[in-house]
């Protein structure tokens, strides 16, 4: 049987397929179809079947990383969204949460996040619960019906419901949903007790509204893919209902996958679907290569995503968001910067050269694509400097070097610079943009970037790798085989995964251990039920418990694991002290005046899958690798003669000295002067500065 992973990017849709019987793996790329990404998706499925000489009946599963929800939020395309909340709290979105991500030094004024719902589409409903979930005032069915009718008359498509303290008692929200089902059944509805049963009213409400906002988009997209996958089945219509449907999973932001049918019910969990898959794929590859502290850099056509991996596990956060909208769901801690191959170079009003975040995308693309693009991009700069070949994807996408040169000449004329100098400037700015993103996930979190190995992948991920070593001082760079398809490969390495949370705010010296045990049991039961629905029986199911703790009076928490049978003992508190000290540089261990407080209890349910094997490559038995040709490449102020190698001819133990360029189907690796590239037994390219080489 065949497993297929498909990652849809802004420029290309990547596919990796593995035949479980033979172990054979294939990788490929097809152009993305921004107007309807499901079209590019099914083209990628067909390509995988062709490469393996297989049929749809051979498909065991298709896993997908999507940016549909992400792109909708980034572009602010939130259409006719309604909000129903507790009467008296209709201005919750105006109050918001003050957050100044870059500090006050870069701006004279702080601007609140954008409103996701206009004021006229916010309705209050009578009824009140206290913080323990006890009813203070009964739910007002009359108010609920009036709110539903008002939003229906206003043409709302989606509705988010978030009542005060519903994390402790969901009855009022469930009653509101029943009213909406009766009065306004065509609306997509999300309730906060399903989406995020945590305290903090603003974040819970915003996460629920984000879920409601993307629900129609994700549902329509997944439905179109489901229909296209069903159409691959060659059985006649009268037999189709009894045929086996191709299993279809979607990547979640938390590092797991879930069946498409379930994802439609919780679409907010997909907001960082694609970047999460890349980080997980890179983590597995790097662990095989012997590295346990890595930075991942996924360079695509539109953007670059970076993350931290410690001991094989990417860092996870619940303080993320997309497009200015906070989404307090568990997600792999990824920072995205507009520094991809298609990022556009432009001049600021002051005449300064800038790069990104705008991208030329897949259509029309960079100037060198010859599809009508007129704005110079990072790809055009690489081409003019000779760092990439005259055609991408093995020549499937020819590049026009003279058109790129002409575009750079126009920009250079305004700056008084040559085409090559402008191109070098574009790449330098792009490298610093990527370096700053890597600093955000390391230095800003108390980590020393020099302790890490960089794993660079994606179509453009390795193009600036050597320069990043210079800027950051990382130990070296690992470039995996088929780097342009690592995110698609990552989709085949992840387990089915669901997260469950329950707020329980208590000082540690007043905690009810029996109540904690009961709450953990309820969360685990919910996780087990969901895993059973996904086809995992009890012996296969794995559960991880954790809790969010803080010092009494603090505003935010630190998450620590809770061992089996160890629900509220001093060992959990000790783990919190240690984690707080590692994160912030201090703890109050032993200070009786600083009481520890529990905030949230969490259970993650995992359905393990069989991960693909990573094969070793043959060793070199005769001499040294031979370059395919030589061409002039700019690595400084003057061009140099650089050896050009085909990656498929390299073997374990080979060493390439810079200046050189290593080319393959989906990516290119420039090896700068002063750098060495070694091939390990897994086929990874290991870039190091020569004075650091062994």
Image (cartoon, rainbow, N blue to C red):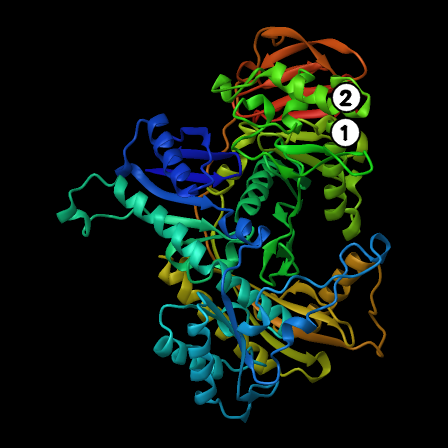
Can you name the residue that lies furthest to the bottom here?
A: 137
* Above or below, comparing residue 630 to residue 23 in the picture: above
Name the element at disc 2.
helix
How crowded pointer 1 is (Cα within 10 Å; few <14, some 14-19, many 20+) is rated as: some
Viewer-side residue, 400 vs 601: 400
- Dot 1 lies on which element? helix
- The circle drawn on residue 428 is 1
Residue at which label 2 appears = 413
Q: Quadrant of residue 470?
A: top right
Image location of residue 127, percent across then percent down: 53, 89
- Whether residue 449 appears in this view of the structure is yes
Q: Is residue 166 left or right of residue 54?
A: right
Residue 49: give x, y in percent of width and height: 33, 31
Q: Residue at x 42, y 83 (%)?
A: 145
Give left or right: position of 654 versus 474. left
Instruction: Please tell me whether residue 502 is drawn above or below residue 128 in the rendered image.
Output: above
Q: Is residue 498 visible?
A: no
Quarter of the figure that contains the C terminus: top right
Q: Residues within 10 Å of mark 2 (few under 14, many from 20)?
A: few
**Quadrant, the N terminus:** top left
Residue at (73, 42) in percent of width and height:
438
Q: Is residue 682 left or right of residue 151?
A: right
- The answer to whether residue 273 is above or below residue 596 is above
What is the spatial separation of the Cα atoms under label 1 and label 2, in whole angstroms? 19 Å
Q: Nearer the viewer, residue 38 or 621?
A: 38
Q: Earlier in the sequence, mark 1 or mark 2?
A: 2
Question: x%, y% of residue 130?
Answer: 60, 88
Q: Are marks 1 and 2 in contact (CB under 8 Å)?
A: no
Instruction: Tell me the quarter of the picture where residue 338 sits.
Output: top right
Task: Give how far across and how far down residue 113 sits, in percent.
Answer: 68, 62
User: In percent of the image, x 47 and y 86: which residue is there?
Assistant: 143
Q: Residue at x 35, y 48 (%)?
A: 224
């Amino acid at each position: 049987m065949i497993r297929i992973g498909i990652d849809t990017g802004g420029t290309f849709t990547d596919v990796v397929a593995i035949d479980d019987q033979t172990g054979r793996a294939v990788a490929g790329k097809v152009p993305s179809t921004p107007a309807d990404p499901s079209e590019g998706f099914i083209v990628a499925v067909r390509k995988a079947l062709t490469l393996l000489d297989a049929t749809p009946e051979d498909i065991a599963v298709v896993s997908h990383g999507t940016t549909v929800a992400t792109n909708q939020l980034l572009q602010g395309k939130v259409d006719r969204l309604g909000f129903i909340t507790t009467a008296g709290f209709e201005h919750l979105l105006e109050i918001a949460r003050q957050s100044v991500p870059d500090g006050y030094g870069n701006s004279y004024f702080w601007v609140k996040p954008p409103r996701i719902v206009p004021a006229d589409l916010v309705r209050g409903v009578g009824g009140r619960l206290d913080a323990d979930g006890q009813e203070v005032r009964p739910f007002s069915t009359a108010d609920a019906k009036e709110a539903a009718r008002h939003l229906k008359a206003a043409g709302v498509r989606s509705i988010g419901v978030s009542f005060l303290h519903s994390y402790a008692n969901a009855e009022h929200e469930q009653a509101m949903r029943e009213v909406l089902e009766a009065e306004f059944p065509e609306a997509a509805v999300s309730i906060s007790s399903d989406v995020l049963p945590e305290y903090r009213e603003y974040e819970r409400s915003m996460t629920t509204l984000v879920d409601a906002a993307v629900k129609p988009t994700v549902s329509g997209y997944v439905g179109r893919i489901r229909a296209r996958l069903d159409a691959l089945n060659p059985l006649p219509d009268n037999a189709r209902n009894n045929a086996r449907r191709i299993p279809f999973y979607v990547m979640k932001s938390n590092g797991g996958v879930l069946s498409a049918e379930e994802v439609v019910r919780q679409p907010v969990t997909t907001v960082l679907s694609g970047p999460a898959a890349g980080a997980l794929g890179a983590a597995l590859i790097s662990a095989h290569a012997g590295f346990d502290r890595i930075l991942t850099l996924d360079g695509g056509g539109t953007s670059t995503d970076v993350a931290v991996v410690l001991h094989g596990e990417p860092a996870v956060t619940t303080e993320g968001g997309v497009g200015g909208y906070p989404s307090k769901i568990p997600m792999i801690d990824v920072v995205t910067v507009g520094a991809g191959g298609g990022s556009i170079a432009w001049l600021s009003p002051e005449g300064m050269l800038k790069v990104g975040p705008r991208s030329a995308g897949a259509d029309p693309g960079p100037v060198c694509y010859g599809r009508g693009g007129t704005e110079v991009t990072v790809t055009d700069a690489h081409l003019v400097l000779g760092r990439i070949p005259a055609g991408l994807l093995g020549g499937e996408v020819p590049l026009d070097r003279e058109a790129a040169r002409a575009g750079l000449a126009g920009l250079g004329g305004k700056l008084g610079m040559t085409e090559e100098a402008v191109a070098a400037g574009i790449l330098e700015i792009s490298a610093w943009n990527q370096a700053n993103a890597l600093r955000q996930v390391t230095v800003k979190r108390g980590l020393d970037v020099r302790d890490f190995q960089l794993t660079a992948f994606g179509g453009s991920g390795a193009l600036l790798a050597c320069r990043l070593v210079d800027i950051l001082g990382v130990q070296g760079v690992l470039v995996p085989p088929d780097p342009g398809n690592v995110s698609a490969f990552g989709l085949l390495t992840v387990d089915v995964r669901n997260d469950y949370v329950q707020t329980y705010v208590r000082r540690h010296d007043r905690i009810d251990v029996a109540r904690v045990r009961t709450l953990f049991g309820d969360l685990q039961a919910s996780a087990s039920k969901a895993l059973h629905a996904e086809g995992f029986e009890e012996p296969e199911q794995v559960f991880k418990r954790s809790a969010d703790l803080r010092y009494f009076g603090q505003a935010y928490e630190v998450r620590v694991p809770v061992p089996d049978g160890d629900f509220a003992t001093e060992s959990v508190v000790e783990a919190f002290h240690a984690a707080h000290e590692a994160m912030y540089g201090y703890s109050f261990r032993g200070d009786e005046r600083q009481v520890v407080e529990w905030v949230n209890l969490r259970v993650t349910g995992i359905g393990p899958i069989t991960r693909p094997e990573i094969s070793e490559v043959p060793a070199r038995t005769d001499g040294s690798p031979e370059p395919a040709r030589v061409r002039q490449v700019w690595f400084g102020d003057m061009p140099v003669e650089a050896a050009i190698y085909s990656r498929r001819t390299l073997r374990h133990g080979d060493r390439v000295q810079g200046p050189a360029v290593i080319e393959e189907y989906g990516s290119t690796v420039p090896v700068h002067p002063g750098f060495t590239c070694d091939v390990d037994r897994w086929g990874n390219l290991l870039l190091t500065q020569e004075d650091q080489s062994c």
